[in-house]
Image: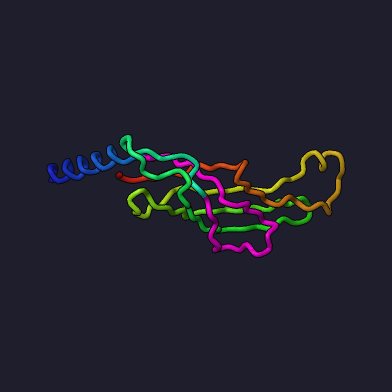
Amino acid sequence: MKRIILLVAFLLTINCAYSKEIPIKIRPEHKITTSNVNILEGDSADFIISEDVFVNSKVFIKKGQKVTGVITSIENNDYFVKPATIYIENFKTINTSNTPIKLKGIVYKTGSEHPKFTELFIFDLLRGGEVQIKPEKDEFIMHIEGNL
């Protein structure tokens, strides 16, 4: 019985020792905004790999490769300075050998609460800001987890 426990513990240790967490920088392909009334939960959102990803000194995922995520939650802005929020998850891409890769991470962004304006005026009918995710400004880090 002791041998079985030691064998299981050893195998679990080996699996953990060889697993990696590789960071990947992504940016949106086009502007994503909650002011677009056609954007809904369950829609896909397109991103692009910002930098080449190397594994063992070889290019694993090329810069410019398309990444697709799913919008899992949208909350619209409202009065009383309630900003809009968006969650994008379940990212997928392919590597240089056309193998599908799942990425771990969440893109969460919230709109503005207009802090400078609300400091000066107490105005309850002011709406919160919309979410703006811009390709030239926003970049996010996802991870590949697992044995490569």
Residue under the image location 36 percent in, 40 percent down? 59
Where residue 47 appears, x then y in whole percent?
A: 52, 51
Give the farthest residue toward the top. 57
Where residue 132 appears, x then y in whole percent?
A: 66, 49
Residue under the image location 55 percent in, 58 percent down? 71
Which of the pair 4/146 is nearer the observer? 146
The colour scheme applied to this rendered structure is rainbow
Question: In the figure, residue 61 lies in which quadrant?
Answer: top left
67 left or right of 40 in image = left
Where residue 144 appears, x then y in whole percent?
A: 39, 45
129 left or right of 100 in image = right
Q: Is residue 29 magenta?
A: yes
Residue under the image location 24 percent in, 43 percent down? 12
Question: In the figure, residue 35 lies in which quadrant?
Answer: bottom right
132 left or right of 96 in image = right
Chain part drawn in magenta: 21-47
Q: Is residue 115 magenta?
A: no
Point out the image quarter for the C terminus. Answer: top left
Which of the pair 96/93 is nearer the observer? 96
Asked if 104 appears above or below 119 in the picture, the reply is below
Residue under the image location 55 percent in, 62 percent down? 43
Question: In the figure, residue 117 lies in which quadrant?
Answer: top right
Where residue 70 appears, x then y in whole percent?
A: 52, 58
